[in-house]
Image (cartoon, coloured by chain):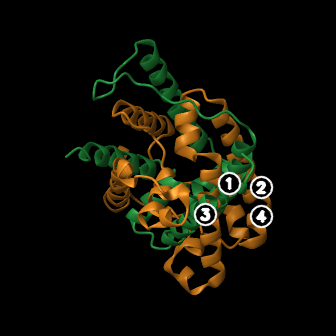
Chain colours: A orange, B green
């Protein structure tokens, strides 16, 4: 049982994620989570004003079902399959975070500094999360996919455009983590 | 119900991303600091599994569950949109510490504040839709 409650190893996890992608291909679909953002915009009525969102969103219901399942999986895993040993990151990382006043994990998935409900009282924290989201949403549509669509699906199919996108992901991520984040948090 | 199998696949995806901690802001930060192999290992094994699976599909012309031969569309060739869009995405990935899949998983797990990230992601997607024809691709 400990095997389930503790952090899952990278090789088991990576293998299962690969199988998730392959099973969606077997079901005649493809693995890509950011497309759901476009679908949600379309459901909200964005198609009336912007043609990009004017498509038959019902054809994407299967992907929304994947999202619903993923949310349920997240709930079950955090509430019933986790323990205090989780998220044991590198002590060097913890020390670095401490210098930015970001609390250590101690079994939590997310730092309280950035994600506790207190953030709703801090305009700055609200802005950080919303701007982070805007970059994610805009960037993934511009690049035509995110970590699932390019890094997993695209690279698995040996797609050069996906490799370019993944290189972009890491350039952006490294710039943020090393140069911008220390200035704003 | 045709959707049940997709809910099940999503459920497994949500569990494995949570239990591998790929949804954790900490793991993403640690990855970008090159202070752990964990996230790189996950991505590498997932891609390796995918490459082997897709090669098998192509070699044996396997059919999908409805009996149609599996065809995986190639990505549209190009460079600019992939690099620039990728960099923009990467900035957000490291700032909010989550990509689109984990955004939904974390909200399901009960992290209310991540709804703000989702809200931003919807705004960002909408913005792209509005100005996409003016952008170089």
Residue A120: horizontal and vertical position, in percent? 54, 83
Question: Mark 2 touching mark 4, by CB under 8 A?
Answer: yes
Question: Mark 3 touching mark 4, by CB under 8 A?
Answer: no
Cα–Cα gap, marks 2 and 4: 7 Å
Question: Disc 4 is attached to a residue of which chain?
Answer: A
Name the image quarter holding residue B40: top right
Front position among marks 2 and 3: 3
Residue A1: horizontal and vertical position, in percent? 30, 46
Q: SS class of the residue under badge 4?
A: helix
Cα–Cα gap, marks 4 and 1: 30 Å
Point out the tag, 3 or 1, that comes first from the N-terminus: 3
Question: Disc 3 is attached to a residue of which chain?
Answer: B
Cα–Cα gap, marks 3 and 1: 15 Å
- For mark 4, what is the residue? A180
From the image, which quarter does the C terminus of chain A lie in? bottom right
Question: Mark 3 touching mark 1, by CB under 8 A?
Answer: no
* Residues marked 4 and 1, same chain: no
Question: Disc 1 is attached to a residue of which chain?
Answer: B
- For mark 2, what is the residue? A175
Name the image quarter holding residue A98: bottom right
Q: SS class of the residue under badge 2?
A: helix
- For mark 3, what is the residue? B124
- For mark 1, what is the residue? B133
- Can residue B33 be seen at all in this image of the molecule? no
């Amino acid at each position: 049982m400990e095997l389930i409650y503790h952090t899952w190893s990278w090789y088991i996890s990576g293998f299962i994620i690969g199988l998730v992608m392959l099973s969606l291909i077997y079901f005649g679909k493809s693995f890509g989570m950011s497309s759901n953002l476009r679908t949600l915009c379309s459901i909200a009525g964005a198609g009336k004003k912007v043609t990009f969102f004017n498509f038959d969103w019902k054809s994407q219901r299967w992907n929304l079902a994947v999202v619903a399942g993923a949310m349920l999986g997240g709930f079950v895993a955090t509430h019933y399959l986790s323990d205090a040993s989780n998220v044991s990151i590198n002590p060097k990382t913890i020390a670095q975070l401490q210098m930015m006043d970001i609390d250590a994990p101690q079994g939590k998935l997310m730092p309280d500094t950035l994600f506790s409900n207190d953030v709703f009282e801090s305009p700055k924290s609200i802005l950080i999360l919303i701007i982070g989201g805007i970059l994610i949403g805009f960037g993934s549509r511009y690049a035509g996919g995110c970590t699932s669509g390019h890094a997993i699906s695209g690279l698995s199919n040996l797609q050069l455009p996906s490799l370019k996108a993944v290189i972009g992901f890491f350039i952006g991520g490294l710039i943020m983590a090393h140069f911008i984040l220390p200035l704003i948090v | 119900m045709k959707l049940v199998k997709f809910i099940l696949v999503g459920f497994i995806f949500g569990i494995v991303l949570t239990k591998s901690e790929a949804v954790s802001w900490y793991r993403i930060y640690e990855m970008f600091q090159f202070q752990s192999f964990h996230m790189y290992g996950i991505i590498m094994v997932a891609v390796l599994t995918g490459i082997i699976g897709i090669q098998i599909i192509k070699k044996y012309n396997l059919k999908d569950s409805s009996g149609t031969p599996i065809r995986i569309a190639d990505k549209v060739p190009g460079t600019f949109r992939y690099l620039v869009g990728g960099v923009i995405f990467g900035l957000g990935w490291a700032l909010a510490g989550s990509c689109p899949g984990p955004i939904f998983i974390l909200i399901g797990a009960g992290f209310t504040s991540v709804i703000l990230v989702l809200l931003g992601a919807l705004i960002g997607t909408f913005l792209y839709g509005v100005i996409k024809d003016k952008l170089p691709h």
